[in-house]
Image: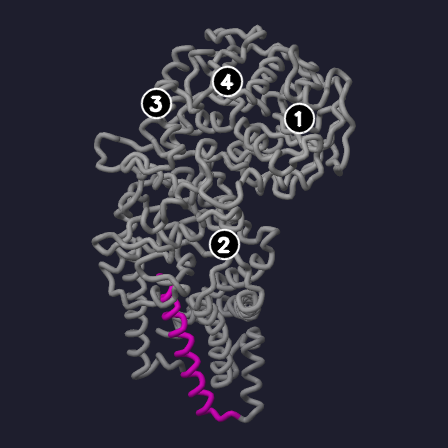
Amino acid sequence: MLPSHELPGNYIYWISLAALIGFAIYSISVKVSIFARGRPDWRFDHLVERVTSLVPYLLGNTRVARKQYWYSGVLHSLIYWGFIVLQIRTLNFLLKGFSEDISLEHGAGIGILQDGYDVLIRAPMDVFNILVLVGCGMAAWQRRFWKPARMTFNMDAWFILFFIAFLMVTDVFTNSFEIASDPGRNGEKFSFLAYGLSEVWNNIGMSQGVKEGMLTFWWYAHLYDFLLFLDYLPYSKHSHVLTVVFNVAYRRIEPTGKLQPIKDFEALERFGANQIEDLTWKQMLDAYTCTECGRCEVNCPAFLTGKELSPKKIMHDLRVVVEQEVRKIQSPLFVWDALKPPGESANGNGNGHAPSADGNLTLIEAVGFNPIWDCVTCGACMYQCPVFIEHVPYLQDMRRFLTMNEANMPETAAATLMQIEQRGHPWRGTQFTRSSWMEGLDVPTFDGTQKYLYWVGCSGAMVDRNIPITRAVARLLTEAGVSFGCLGEEEQCTGDPARRLGNEYLFQEQAKSLIEVLKAKGVERIITNCPHCFNTMQNEYPDFDGTFEVIHHTTFLNKLLGDGALVPKNDLPLAITYHDSCYLGRHNGNYDSPRDIIDRLPGGSRVEMPRSRELSFCCGAGGSHMWVEESKGKRINVARTEEAQETGAQIVATACPFCIQMFEDGIPTVQPDEEKRMKTFDVAELLELTVIGRPAGGSPAADAMGVGPGDAPPAQGAEPVEAGAES
């Protein structure tokens, strides 16, 4: 007989269960009530995809157990899977606490159900008890001895490990003393671990009274460990145990490069985010789902080059601000304050941001000015996060607040926004017009009869280094007989720089104006050089009734190669490393087209940087950092150039005008000797040389390499990736 089956144990059980589960529900409901004050965010579309994706992402742990984090993946899988499976035994334990008759193992007195429980449940439960304890041991070793720099170390994790491990121990000991004190039950031997321990108790001569007393102790220990763990979770960084299902299910389905628009400007008192009411419920949920694993941090270009930004700390700061509101409803006498690492207080983030006059931190005060502007929006943090936290939109919302409400931004950002407002493009001091690049080329004006609009963009038309790329694409399209035209002086800025600098109003004005022009011209299909223009037109313009088929030039040129419309003829025997643009690769999933083009270059060989494809490292120009000076530390473009240099490649190829400019700036810093320097080119420039040859008047690619038809320097100093091979 269990302690809860007779007086006073039954009352203790009922009261404990009601009180502690009630407290857990209350704690969770308080936080949910705060989330409900946030802005709406519709995450209930694509329901089939959201539900089915729980299998690989949640049950399969695919984002947790990535190759570079195999140790954490193994230990987490052992604990997580065991914890999930053992909820069957927990349910049986709680039901059995009321009555044997309603327990799972009793099976409503039906023999086949009882036998099924014995065979299918008892042995696997003991196996998972062992696996969870092994996982806890691995986690303890990681925290005590290995101590990866990315992780946050405090007492909270040790409390959680104790709760979980002790839950396993009490489960086994409770079952063992239950078997020992009431032997002869059917199927008890299937619980091989508990049965083995029960034999130990019998063999050492333990009396019946001691067995029953130990059963009472371990039964209550198991009960209160479970209930106190449940009560502790809402106040722990391990609250993700409660929230992760929802965070994964309601994750972003659309491309990560897309930002949500601000609607109804006239009805809003402030723009962006500074108070928790300015956040969406999903953004607040993110803060309570963060596991503080640090994967975002050790993949963040800003953090790795010595800037103040830490995506992990951003989530911590957000939770601190939300907790301020929670404490207004709840008593503050909880472990949240006690478990902070040294140097952090309940009312700050440890970086010297003081509370406002009312004693509460705003979001901007908690995070700080520099971290908000350090972000290059590369999306590495979001890709690496095992629980689908969305750091970039949160930082962008705070930029919107600083820019549109306070005009508080770096000087170069303010100057760029003024340039866009006055001249319609972000490039101060340029002597070029939007049609200067056409000189000497027969480029048709788009009039609606052509199949494709070739969108040049501000950088492709206004920046000296990028004009040859624009001309190369135009020559290749002409060579392939593509029906295309350009807008020339009628082109406008897509608004992307303004949006990433936080001026959402200016972006929307530019977007609506350009969409009107494109519709009036009858544009349906757009080819663009710039991944940032591509992302804006493809993913963000549909929010303003601007739906077009947008194709990046690497995708289009690769198709022309595949169709035989372009045929490379001239050798280019050079070792080439390809740099993935964040807004082409990680944000929009185009990794293969540029590599396919490189692999088709006659005589060429491809060598990959260690960080490539999904793991690629930003050039430093994203988030409109093309026009914003970095706050401190090593320049991001220099760090990326050093990685390219280590490959031994002669050419750094990319498919983004911003990346080209950042490498042009970084290469002289990394390789002062001009004769030994790498060169950087767009893949279209390299393809132009092999398909058409040296353009009239030369080009940077042809001039730098001395390349004409059949004339190219030999490749040196790099191990090639064979054509068609993947990195």
Distance between mark 3 and mark 2 Cα atoms: 39 Å
Give whichever of 216, 159 is nearer the camera. Answer: 159
Residue 560 lies in the magenta-colored region: no
- The answer, for residue 104, to whether it is visible in the render is no
Are dots 3 and 2 in contact, CB under 8 Å?
A: no
Question: Which residue is labeled 4 in the image?
Answer: 461
Depth-wise, is mark 1 or mark 2 nearer the camera?
2
- The answer, for residue 573, to whether it is visible in the render is yes
Q: Secondary structure at mark 1?
A: helix
* Residue drawn at the location 76% of the way across and 27% of the way down: 573
> In the rendered structure, which disc, 2 or 4, sits on the residue that comes first in sequence?
2
Distance between mark 2 and mark 4 Cα atoms: 41 Å
> In the rendered structure, which disc, 3 or 1, sits on the residue that comes first in sequence?
3
> In the rendered structure, which disc, 1 or 2, sits on the residue that comes first in sequence?
2
Are dots 1 and 2 in contact, CB under 8 Å?
A: no
Distance between mark 3 and mark 1 Cα atoms: 38 Å
Q: Which mark is residue 294?
A: 2
Which quadrant of the figure has residue 393? top left
Q: Where does residue 654 sit, x and y in percent of width and height?
A: 60, 30
Amino acid type of the residue that numbered disc 2 sits on in the rendered structure: Gly
Q: Residues within 10 Å of mark 3 (few under 14, many from 20)?
A: some
Depth-wise, is mark 3 or mark 2 nearer the camera?
3
Question: Which residue is labeled 3 in the image?
Answer: 421
Per the picture, the main secondary structure of the magenta-coloured stretch is helix
Residue stretch rendered in magenta on the structure: 206-234
> In the rendered structure, which disc, 3 or 4, sits on the residue that comes first in sequence?
3
Question: Which residue is labeled 1 in the image?
Answer: 597
Extreme front residue here? Answer: 673
- Quadrant assignment for the C terminus: top right
Distance between mark 1 and mark 2 Cα atoms: 36 Å
Amino acid type of the residue that numbered disc 3 sits on in the rendered structure: Glu
Amino acid type of the residue that numbered disc 4 sits on in the rendered structure: Ala
